[in-house]
Image (cartoon, rainbow, N blue to C red):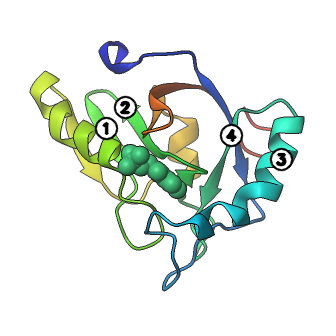
Amino acid sequence: MAVLIVSSGLNLKVDHTYRRAHTGGTGGVKSCTNYSPVVKSLREAKSAGFSDVLFLDAATGRNIEEVSTCNIFVVKENILSTPPISGTILPGITRKSISELAPDIGYQVQERDVSVDELLEAEEVFCTGTAVVVRAVESVTFYETK
Ligand SMILES: *Cc1c(COP(=O)(O)O)cnc(C)c1O
C-alpha cells in the first residue's frame, strides 16, 4: 500500500477494557458524543507514548472496531479488510474512498469482522480519516504483545 501512505506511522494501543460504542448508541454517527468516552483511554495511552487507541467491539471484545477518530484497514496479500458498518463505527468518507479506489490498483476489499489476532498477524495496517488522511500503523500493542 506504499502508494497510499502519506505520512509517518501511528503506534496504537488496543484498549482491552473499555468499549467506545454499543449497538443502539451513537457510535455510527459523527457526533461529539463519540469523543468524550475516549478521552480517558486516549490520555492514558498518550502519556505512555502511544499515538492513539484502537477500540474493540462491545459484544465480544474480540474484534477490532476503530481508532478514536479514524477507521482501520488490515492488509494481507492483496486483500484489505476493514470492520463492517454495523452502527458502532463511523462510516468514514475516507474509508469509503479507499474501498472504492483500492480495486483499481489490484486490491480486493472485504468489509467483515476482523479479530485482534488477525490484526497482529497482518502484513500492514493503516488508518483512514479526515484528520489522519491515510496513515500507516507502525505498531499495535495488545496487552504486552506488540
Ligand atoms: C471522523 C471520524 C472517522 C473518519 O471519518 P472521515 O469521514 O473519513 O473523516 C472515523 N471514526 C470516527 C470516530 C470519526 O469521528
What is the distance, in whole Å, between disc 1 and disc 3 at their CAs?
Answer: 30 Å
Foreground mark, 2 or 3, reads 3
Q: Residue at coordinates 76% horizontally, 48% vertically from top-left? A: 42
In the figure, 4 relative to 118: above or below? Answer: above
Mark 4–mark 2 contact, CB under 8 Å?
no
Nearer-N-terminus badge (4/1): 4
Amino acid bearing label 1: Leu
What is the distance, in whole Å, between disc 4 and disc 3 at their CAs?
Answer: 9 Å
Mark 2–mark 3 contact, CB under 8 Å?
no
Query: Is residue 115 visible to the viewer in this orientation of the structure?
Result: no
Assess disc 1: are there few (<14), some (14-19) or many (≥20) residues with their C-alpha within 10 Å of its C-alpha.
Answer: many
Foreground mark, 2 or 1, reads 1
Nearer-N-terminus badge (1/3): 3
Name the residue carrying label 3: 43
Q: Is mark 2 within 8 Å of ligand 1?
A: no
Query: Is residue 96 visible to the viewer in this orientation of the structure?
Result: yes
Nearer-N-terminus badge (4/2): 4
Name the residue carrying label 2: 76
Amino acid bearing label 3: Arg
Question: How far from the left and from the top, in percent, is residue 114?
Answer: 45, 53
Mark 1–mark 3 contact, CB under 8 Å?
no
Question: How far from the left and from the top, in percent, is residue 87?
Answer: 41, 73
The quarter of the picture where the N terminus appears is top left
- Mark 2 lies on a secondary structure that is strand
Foreground mark, 4 or 2, reads 4
- Mark 4 lies on a secondary structure that is strand
In the figure, 122 relative to 4: above or below? Answer: below
What is the distance, in whole Å, between disc 4 and disc 1 at their CAs?
Answer: 21 Å
Amino acid bearing label 4: Asp
The quarter of the picture where the C terminus appears is top right
Name the residue carrying label 4: 52
